[in-house]
Amino acid sequence: MPAVAKHELGQLLMLTLQDFQRRLDRDLEGSGFPGIRHRHRALFMHLERHGASRSVDLAEGAGIRPKSMMKICHELDGLGLITRRPDPADSRAKLIEFTVDGQRLIEQLKKSTERVWR
C-alpha cells in the first residue's frame, strides 16, 4: 500500500466525513425525517445533556455563532422537533428542548448511524 502524504490524509478524512454525513442524511430521510442535515447535528450533540438549554449555551458547546444556532433552532422548530419556552431565570431567553418527535428523531439517528457504519 503506498504511503499517504499528510495533506492527502487530511483530505481523505474530510471526504470520508462528507460521505458519511450524506449517507446519514439519506437514511434519516428514508426513515421519515426529511430535511435533517449535518448542520442540525450541532444542536443534537448538545441538547438535553443537562436538561433544556438556551441557544447561546448550545452555540458555545457546538463552537458556532449564536446567530447560527438560532437559525438551526428556527428550522428544527418549524419541523416540530424542538420547542422553545420562556426561561424562568431570564425573561429575555428561551429554553429549548426536544418534542416527542424530536426524541423519536434522536432514537432514529442512533439506528441510522449504526446502519451507515455497517
Image (cartoon, grey):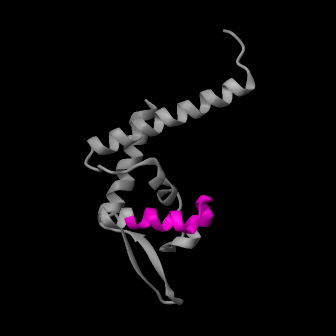
- Please indicate, yes or no, whether residue 49 appears anywhere in the rendered image: no
* Relative to 4, 78 lies left or right: left
The picture places residue 59, in percent across and down from the top left corner, at 57, 65
Q: Which residues are magenta?
A: 58-74
Identify which residue, 53 or 40, lies in the foreground. Answer: 40
Residue drawn at x 46%, y 48% is 38
Q: Quadrant of residue 71?
A: bottom left
The picture places residue 8, in percent across and down from the top left corner, at 67, 24
Q: In the displayed image of the protein, which residue is found farthest to the top?
A: 1
**50 within the magenta span:** no
- Please indicate, yes or no, whether residue 79 appears anywhere in the rendered image: yes
Residue drawn at x 50%, y 36% is 18
The picture places residue 5, in percent across and down from the top left corner, at 73, 21
Q: Quadrant of residue 100?
A: bottom left
Identify which residue, 96 or 103, lies in the foreground. Answer: 96
**62 within the magenta span:** yes
